[in-house]
Image (cartoon, rainbow, N blue to C red):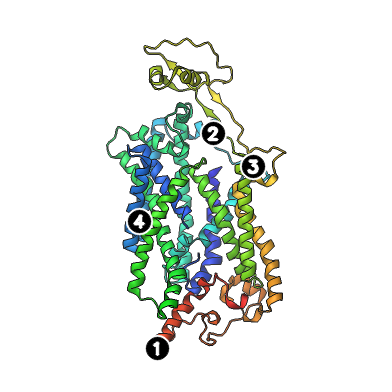
């Protein structure tokens, strides 16, 4: 079922290419407004490196974080892009090696899929319309489509990459190419998961205590496959680390760019009455890169306490934090009557609703159950557990049905049965808890968080915008800058008019972008620079929409 998320990713890429990128590229923005997202990726690589190597978790976090921080702060966006190009190749090599060796050990891909299907891991027929069902076809396609639309269109991490290309057509083309790459990468990652499950279908390492959290399973699997082959575990470490650092480096660079453009430059200009020099801006950006790198390391240690799997943590966080921001951008692009008051009200309201929902989830301890796990094929030396546990702990392990034992030197007399376990299989319901005493929204699947944010933003933002326009009297449809709106919407509505490219008393807030124009002195050159950043610094809404 998770594989269907590739459809949602494709929808997100296409929506971004057709709706948002033309607007961003036309405005020549530097920023669109990321720390938790980067920390999730640092956590991923650190957990895996800990499982494969003998390094402690805290050591791998610091090592990965410092390496990424150094090449990001020193090399800038060019270093990030070149590193990404190399890292995608390493990711492919690692995944292919795991798929090839794992399927060979099981007798081929046909056998892999047979085992997975027999255990209920290949399912594409969950069509329930109930939003409380954790994963459905509708949720994976439409719910995740909205989530990835939010990710690709309103996240500085991605937008900054589009804007490194010098034309709108090239930026859109990069997204179209990414659709194809997404299908390949996601399919490969899902296939790795299927191969790993098939390998452990009759003996779950987590039940044996070999792995304490699901995110370490892949590292354990790699050591089982390649532990005896020199260099292969290292290739896997490179694969995971490359994937994580690709995101981390881009994110840290993006944070530094946003903080420079939206915070530091305005303050510097206000204090010194002159624009910031390029040399000073470069140096201060490197300092920001170091700062955000250290902050990423700190947040990673906090994320290590989370109970969900890494992928679910990422999707939940982006739904909660990215959904409201996506709603704010979308209401601004689609609704001429929206203004800063309405956008802010919609943003705060949707964020508050999602935080409230997740607070309820935590309060009532609503957690999804795992899919069935089979432990009938576990053959473990009894002495291994005898030496590591007390007698009572060992008895708990055995009576839980986790092990079929071969005794070697330690006789045990067990006066218990396995009546609670059928053929070593623990079967659990895969649906979310739906107790009638718990508020409905607390049980809603996380895949719909972005949709909830979008609905709340529009439901609150539009009335507040209209009310603010009536109170302030500043809203005039003919004064709106048509470049702030989606081109299809402009053609259908015809309600936007181009503003004149002039200044009013030298004010940046009433000036639209002037390109390819010769300026005769330093003051006007500074004004052009500020104009190019004006909409970004005002939250994507021009002054006539205040």
For the residues labelled 3 and 4, the Cα–Cα distance comes to 40 Å
Q: Which residue appears farthest toward the left when viewing the image?
A: 230
Q: Which residue appears farthest toward the front when viewing the image?
A: 271
The reply to whether the C-beta atoms of the residues labelled 2 and 1 are less than 8 Å apart is: no
Q: Quadrant of residue 253?
A: bottom left
For the residues labelled 3 and 1, the Cα–Cα distance comes to 63 Å
List x then y, in percent, for residue 439: 70, 44
**Neighbour class for label 2 at 10 Å: few (<14), some, many (≥20)?**
some
Say whether disc 4 or disc 2 marks the residue closer to the N-terminus. Answer: 4
What residue is shown with label 1?
521
Q: Secondary structure at mark 3?
A: loop
What residue is shown with label 2?
117
**Neighbour class for label 4 at 10 Å: few (<14), some, many (≥20)?**
many
The quadrant of the picture occupied by the C terminus is bottom right
What residue is shown with label 4?
69
For the residues labelled 4 and 2, the Cα–Cα distance comes to 43 Å
The quadrant of the picture occupied by the N terminus is top right
- Asked if residue 95 shows in the view, the reply is no
Residue 411 versus residue 125 in the image, above or below: above
Say whether disc 2 or disc 1 marks the residue closer to the N-terminus. Answer: 2
What residue is shown with label 3?
133
Say whether disc 3 or disc 4 marks the residue closer to the N-terminus. Answer: 4
| Residue drawn at the location 44% of the way across and 28% of the way down | 209
List x then y, in percent, for residue 86: 34, 54
| Residue drawn at the location 46% of the way across and 57% of the way down | 178
Say whether disc 3 or disc 1 marks the residue closer to the N-terminus. Answer: 3
Q: Quadrant of residue 522?
A: bottom left
Residue 351 versus residue 396 in the image, above or below: below
The reply to whether the C-beta atoms of the residues labelled 4 and 2 are less than 8 Å apart is: no
List x then y, in percent, for residue 94: 36, 44
């Amino acid at each position: 079922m998770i594989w269907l998320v590739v459809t949602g990713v494709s929808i997100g890429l296409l929506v971004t290419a057709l709706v948002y990128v033309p607007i961003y590229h036309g405005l020549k923005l530097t920023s669109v407004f990321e720390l938790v997202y980067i920390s999730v990726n640092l956590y991923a690589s650190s957990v895996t490196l800990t499982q494969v190597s003998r390094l402690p978790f805290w050591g791998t976090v610091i090592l990965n974080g410092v390496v990424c921080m150094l090449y990001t702060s020193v090399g800038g966006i060019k270093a990030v892009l070149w590193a990404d190009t190399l890292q995608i190749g390493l990711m492919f090599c690692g995944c292919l090696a795991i798929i090839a060796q794992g399927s060979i050990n099981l007798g081929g891909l046909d056998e892999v899929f047979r085992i997975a299907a027999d255990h209920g891991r290949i399912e594409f027929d969950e069509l329930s319309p109930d939003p409380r069902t954790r994963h459905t076809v509708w949720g994976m396609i439409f719910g995740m489509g909205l989530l990835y639309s939010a990710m690709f269109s309103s996240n500085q991490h991605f937008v900054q990459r589009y804007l490194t290309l010098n034309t709108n057509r090239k930026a859109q083309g990069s997204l179209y190419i990414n659709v194809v790459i997404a299908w390949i990468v996601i399919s490969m990652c899902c296939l790795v998961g299927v191969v790993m499950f098939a390998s452990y279908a009759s003996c779950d390492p987590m039940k044996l205590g070999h792995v304490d959290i699901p995110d370490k399973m892949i590292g354990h699997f790699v050591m089982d496959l390649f532990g005896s082959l020199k260099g292969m575990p290292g290739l896997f470490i490179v694969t995971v680390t490359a994937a994580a650092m690709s995101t981390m480096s881009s994110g840290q660079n993006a944070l530094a760019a946003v903080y420079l453009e939206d915070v530091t430059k305005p303050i510097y200009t206000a204090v010194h009455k002159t624009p910031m020099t390029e040399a000073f801006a470069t140096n201060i950006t490197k300092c920001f890169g170091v700062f955000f790198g250290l902050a990423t390391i700190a947040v990673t240690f906090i994320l290590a306490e989370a109970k969900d799997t890494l992928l679910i943590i990422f999707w939940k966080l982006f739904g909660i934090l990215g959904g409201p921001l996506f709603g704010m951008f979308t209401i601004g692009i689609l609704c001429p009557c929206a203004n800063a008051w309405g956008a802010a009200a919609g943003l705060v309201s949707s964020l508050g609703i999602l935080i409230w929902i997740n607070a309820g989830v935590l309060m009532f301890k609503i957690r999804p159950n795992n899919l069935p796990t089979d432990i009938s094929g576990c053959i473990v030396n009894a002495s291994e557990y005898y030496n590591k546990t007390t007698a009572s702990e060992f008895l708990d392990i055995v009576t839980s049905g986790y092990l079929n034992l071969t005794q070697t030197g330690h006789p045990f007399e067990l006066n218990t049965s396995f009546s609670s376990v059928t053929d070593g299989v623990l079967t659990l319901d895969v649906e979310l808890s739906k107790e009638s005493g718990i508020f409905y929204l607390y049980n809603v699947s996380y895949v719909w968080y972005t949709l909830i944010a979008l609905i709340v933003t529009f439901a609150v933002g539009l009335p507040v915008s209209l009310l603010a326009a009536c109170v302030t009297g500043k809203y005039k449809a003919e004064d709106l800058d048509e470049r702030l709106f989606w081109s299809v919407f402009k053609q259908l509505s015809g309600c936007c008019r181009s503003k004149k490219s002039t200044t009013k008393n030298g004010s940046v807030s009433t000036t639209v972008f002037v390109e390819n124009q010769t300026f005769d002195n330093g003051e006007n050159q500074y004004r052009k620079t500020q104009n190019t950043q004006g909409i970004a610094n005002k939250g994507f809404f021009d002054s006539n929409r205040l």
